[in-house]
Image (spheres, helix red, strand yellow):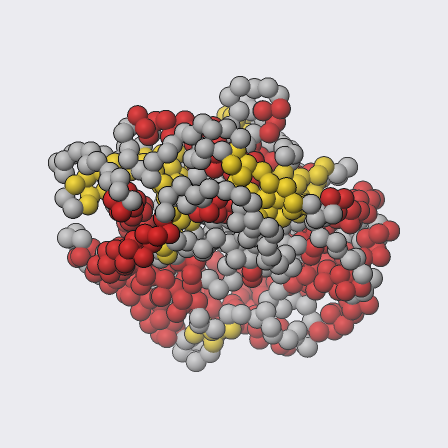
Amino acid sequence: MSRNEVDQSWSKYLVSAAVATLLALMLMVNPSVADQDEELPEELTVDALYSELHPEPVFGETAMELLRELDTKHYSNVVFDERFSGRIFDNFLDALDGSKLYFLEEDIEAFEQHRNDLVNGLRSGNIGPAYEIYNTYVRRVLDRLIWTIEHVENDLQYVDFDTEEYLELDREDAAWASSHDQLDELWRLRIKNSALSLRLTDMEMETVQERLSSRYRNQLNQVSRTNGRDVFQAYLSTVAKTVDPHTNYFSPRDSENFNMGLRGSLQGIGAQLTTEDEFTKVAELIKGGPAEQAGELRAGDRIIGIAQGEDGEMQDVIGLRLDDVVDQIRGEKGSLVRLNVLPAEATSEASAREISIVRDTVELSEQFARAEVIDIEMDEEHYKVGVITLPSFYFDFEAASAGLPNYRSSVRDVKDLLEELKQEDVEAVVMDLRYNGGGSLNEANELVGLFIEGGPTVQIRYSGQRNGFVRSYGDNSSDVSYDGPLAVVVNRASASASEIFAGAIQDYQRGIVLGGQTFGKGTVQEIIPMDYGQVKLTRSKFYRISGASTQHRGVLPDINFPDRYQAIDSMGESNLDGALPWDTVRPVEYNTYFPIRQVLPQLQASHEARAATNPDFIYMNGAVERMKEARSRTRLPLQEEALREQREADRRAAFDANNIRRMMKGQPMEVWEEEDSEDVSEDSVALLEREDDAREEEDEIDPILLESGHILVEIARLLGTPMTASYSSSDSISANL
């Protein structure tokens, strides 16, 4: 199998697991400090801020090359005709203005002349229509932000928060605005919602006005700095994704980020960044990275200035785009960067302090496999169960190709962890693949081999020159690293290579699959270098050894656990535009290990009996239902008292549910306090998504893993090989290896 065959699922839904999301926010390679922030002109007009964007020659040449690659190498026999051109057209508009907040109906009518001719343009290297659309988009965004700033600075003081009004939350199917007046009304309601969110934090209206004015002025500043590369990347990415949702184009800059995801390392300071209002905020420090080791930068701090080396001038970065801030913090190993940092608790820039960090190579340790041992109590006996958490199927192609002995590989790491767990005398193992978005297919294939005595693991169907040829891949070694009771835990965010592993374990009945339905990504992508950047395109489709594709349907668990993604009806491959269909191929011959399916009814009944009285499962099921209810809301009240009551009711429901959980577990109840921080301004879904923070902060063992352990103990008993109680109830163990 080619070392370039990868199946990383970079879906926007896989927030917790997607390495791409992490890498997009990481501080990496390139010390250049370009395009510094400039002051806005005193008179805000579109003409004063707008500069027409034009493609560079290399962009057109790359467009032609991309179309050739898609035409000759993609799994599907894509027909690049007027219909496909229309899909590019619609997808590009949706990517720019999916909520229909900027373009006018007259703009769309003017663009229609390009609907059926975009493919011909790509063939000839003409991407001018994309720039025409994008230039209009930039003008509309500038116009809208200027109107917003004027409204905030002149009219916000007159807003009536007692009037019964609502903000529509989903505008995907709304009509394009026919006039500027319609857009004005849409934005008036949006501004009112932003102001109301700040008011609910007991912020004075004068401060609200200042905050929003600063926010929109910074956004205006950034939009005015849009460049031709932005258009090029957005358009070619749209073209590629129109073929299928996992095909994508990466510019040279984005290519490096993607490749770092597979290597599992980068050069920088080791921090994950996000944007909060006009600030760049430190979301997390990478363990063992330069920033953590220096000890001065902390999660929650805001970076407001950046300087290069000992003598570089400190550049203000408040309001800059996140990628521009990342560019300035990037740098080679051993180079120095100075940051002007506003501590998380500070309310004034007077509290800012300067820190210095020397860049270094940072391993993304949270991406690598890790293990722990948990205590399972059953019938007053205690058992050791090992848990291996695998966030992705990683493999450092470059280091392996260079012959370096210590290259990172998920299979090598898991094999070592299994040996450590056996030294701990564990009697069962849980492979936790929740949020694992995929990675190297070859790694998934070899990982199955750690648990079986050889045999097929996955089938690959190729197209194009191979004319639909199906080939079986498998493990040729009889060596088994672990032969004891095994469970694989998945959820809706487990995708691609995760589904191959879980599906093979399930088909072989080598272990039991627990959790939620997986994502349903059954395609394999290959990275193909181009003269300018690279393309990741779908080259083949994989199938389980039973012959069923994981595409669309994913892997269905043997026993279902609560999964908050159940509340997100847009989650999963089947909800992605252009996703390839589900189908089957002929099964291959394989043997089964344990009659797990025979004992499933008993396991299911026992699980349901435990879950019915388990405080954590009761809480998690309730959280899913509350999240479903919150996500079903189609509009948001803009009357202050109504919104306050709704959010307080959501908070109270979550609070009461958590207190019931605590009471059932014999833990002290928490006391309800009125919220006076900015948390109260978060929407209901955001609040619900953080409901399990309390359990994590108290360092409780994940109830999903505990229940998985109970099921493993029962499997061993039902199959006639009961596990041996390993220690008395007075002992305790929860050791990180």
Asked whether the viewer can see residue 181, the reply is yes
**Quick one: 472 or 235, which is closer to the camera?**
472
- Left or right of 65? Residue 492 is left
| x then y, percent, for residue 31 | 61, 31
| x then y, percent, for residue 207 | 43, 60
Q: Quadrant for the N terminus, please.
A: top right
Whether 177 is drawn above or below 230: the answer is below
State the residue at coordinates (14%, 35%): 728
Displayed quadrant of residue 57: top right
State the residue at coordinates (71%, 74%): 105
**Quick one: 733 or 308, which is closer to the camera?**
733
**Quick one: 23 or 483, which is closer to the camera?**
483
Q: Quadrant for the C terminus, please.
A: top left
| x then y, percent, for residue 43 | 66, 60
**Quick one: 564 or 691, which is closer to the camera?**
564
Disc count in the image? 0
- Left or right of 258? Residue 351 is left
Displayed quadrant of residue 2: top right
